[in-house]
Image (cartoon, rainbow, N blue to C red):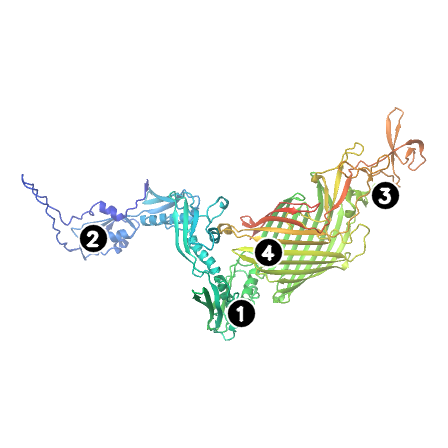
Amino acid sequence: MLSGIGIAHAQDATAQQGQPTGQQPAAQSQPSAPATPGQAAPQQAIPLVPQEQERVIKSLRVEGSQRIEPATILSYTKLRVGETYTNATVDQAIKDLLASDFLADVSISGVETGDLVIHIKENPVINRVILEGNKRLKDDKITKEIKLAPRQIFTRTAVRADVARIIELYRRQGRFAATVDPQMVKLDQNRVDVIFEIHEGPKSKVRQINIIGNEKFSDDKLRGEMATKQARWFRIFSSNTSYDQDRMAYDQQKMRQFYLTQGYADFRVTSAVAELTPDKRDFIITYVVEEGDRYKFGDVSVDSGIRDFDDKKLAQALPFKKGDWYNAKQVEDAVDQLSQTAGFAGYAFADVRPEFQPDRENHTMDVTFNIAEAKRTYVERINITGNTQTKDKVIRREMRVAEGDAFNSFLIKRSEDRINSLGYFQDKFEIDRKQGSSDDRIDLNANVEEKSTGELSLSAGFSSLERFLVQAAIRQRNFRGMGQDAHAQVNYSSYSKSAELGFTEPYLFDKPIALGATIFRRDYNSFNYIGQNRNTTYSQVQTGFQISTGLPLTEYWTLSGRYSLSVDDVTLDKNSFYKDSNGDGTLDTCDPLKAGRYLCDAIGNRLTSLLGASLIYSSLNSNLRPTKGTRFVAGVDFAGLGGDVRYLRGRLNASKYWNVGSGFIFSLSGEGGYIHSLEGSRGPGVDPVRITDRFYLGEPQFRGFDIRGVGPRIQRVPYTGTVASGTQALVTDRKQIIDDALGGKAYYLGKAELEIPLGSGAQELGLRPSIFVQVGALFGITRPQLNTAYTQATDSNGVPLNNADGSPSFLPPRLTASDGSPLFYNSYQNDAGDTLTRLTTCSAGYSDTAGGTCTGSEANTAAFSNSTIYYERFLGDSARPRISVGIGTDWNSPFGPLRIDIAKAILTQPGDDTKLFTFNVGRQF
């Protein structure tokens, strides 16, 4: 049976049913005598209530109890066998039992005889609590806020409270039109299902924010300071356009803070009213303000009770002076500055309090910063808790203070930054400070919360050059809880295949010396596409190892070194790029016509022995997600300590982060490099730095461009048509052009990025969007020799011919004999009269043997190859900047950390390959 849950209390129902069973009225009125004709009807007599008599309870029992013990029922009353009672006593017992919320109905019989029987009807047990109609608030959000739950006792009081709570939850979401209709379904065994039928209604938006009394600043300026925003079409995704009472109070505080920063010390909000429109869809908020007069700073002084401090020097270092406009934010900053100064000097509990003395006639504000007397503080204990996996020593070695040291707030902050940079614990870790055993002792409590340090990442992508690519990697950054780093990585794509194993010990023999080793094998295939056909250019297989070490020089400076030994084997597909130079049918020589001179020069097997060092400066507050600080790296590598390759390579890298307020993080970064060969010339048109040792620029470091999409390259553009037909022309379809990146000897890359904070809902999803602009270039190689083996067509006068598109008209390569003699086509007729063609070395007539005596005088036709003709052009070797702009976001998705970027290249150079969209995904464990 489905019924509405009544609002009347159970006592009311009892009252409507009359007296309890067996209980008689205390008195009854007697009927009046009938009126005599002609006489007025006599007034009805007022009944007399006899005084209640006390009776003794002879027996007492409970009937109707199912779950509740009779003794429990009796414990809620004052009725006891052998004691006296009256009607009032019985009525009070009924009220007490109903107030227990255990019972739906109570009556007492046997009042006249003293054999009292308490008849009860227990409240039902809740079988289920069902929510219907809730779409904006999920079940789990509501059920944890209400009190009714399965296997609990059903009461109307609890129902009313839960209805009110659900409505409050919806109001906090801005849905003031929401209603809740509670229903009850009766089941057997005195059980019920409770159903809350929810009608959510539309979200109540803030239609208008009115401000009355402001003269110095416009309404728009003040609205801009508020968290609440007016509902407009362009704020469709904003959560701040809904009404929230708490946010309204926050907005008043924000307005006051703004005026206080502008010098209006007497500003106040005299009234704040939020009116709901009749349709309950929108709110109109009205603030009435009094701006008051604008103040300037008067006398600014410091009164320190700490004898080590010079009051005048402290006052001179404050961020404001007498005569400046009063700014409450600067006063707060000054308090922090003085507290920090005291902390640097070892006074952990220094109390800094500003004292204000306004001069309302001259509109000045005198400020005195009182620093209470304090004792120099020493660290008594450092307590580390919460680390279930990480060893204590891994945390303690990042602490910049030790037990017994003088307290220093700067070193405490530095310790927090270093521990956060480990990446082993939840963000925003802070060291708590508590009073020690005496006034000059302090305990530092590092309560950490472990987070996953293992990473299992799967990355996928799609490129116009590579097609599909995938990467799998496993890494444990806190191996065995000792802070060690172990990783393995495998990459597979049409572009490359690689495998890598590495291990790093950050504290060798418990000393601040890092030592790591990596072994690797990388199989890189450079290729391009002609139409839909993939054409491999060269293959590079690199096998080797690297040993690296790091040694801190100071708190911020580190010196690192590395040594690597690798073997590079660069090959070309013989069937595609080789020719038979000896005429024996063996493909033994790289053919520049097929591969290009730049690829033929790269072929070979080389051993590289490289020694490098880097000087690193870092004041970042976190190495994983910095919001403040600077990082600078200068590195140099020398190849030539043995091996076959000799060069010197240098790199610079710098970045700076600022927390610009309100959650915005701005960063600037730049890097550059140059490589110089220590070998001699390798021939005209051949750069002394091999193609495999040069820098490359593009995705992922330069967003908006494809992999190796920036810098010098050779494009081999095929011709369509023939010279004879007059239709020869260069193809214009980019997919038909062979594009080989050559790399560069110098590059630069800069980036400016602004991370944008989102609302609480987006933050819970782990969304961190940003906008960025990048500028960079890759350049500096020797101009390669382009293919000149093709013969340019000429007219009858020997004048070179060009095509309609302006490109030179090329003839296919001449066919030659084994001795290099040019071949010709000789046409003759056989005995049957058919015209046949034979190759001959004779420009006129015919010879039975190559190079033999030519017979006849008829001119022969020059013999050309029927292979595709390519026009080679060298592009991209320019230091002129390439610029891209874009948006991207980091997202802690259900699939793992995801990075998505959409970047548009707005300034390019001829030959650059652009790319609009990239993404990367991985999972932590």
Q: CA distance from mark 1 to mark 3?
A: 89 Å
> Earlier along the polypeptide chain: callout 2 or callout 3?
2
370 displayed left or right of 607: left
Amino acid type assigned to the residue bearing label 1 in the image: Gln
State the residue position of label 1: 316
Instruction: Count the marks.
Output: 4
Q: CA distance from mark 1 to mark 2?
A: 82 Å
Q: CA distance from mark 4 to mark 2?
A: 79 Å
Disc 3 is placed on an element classified as loop
Q: Which mark is residue 667?
A: 4
Q: Nearer the viewer, mark 4 or mark 2?
A: 4
Disc 4 is placed on an element classified as strand
Q: Residue furthest top?
A: 832
- Eyeballing the image, is 266 above or below 244? below
- Eyeballing the image, is 584 above or below 829? below
Q: Which mark is residue 90?
A: 2
State the residue position of label 3: 582
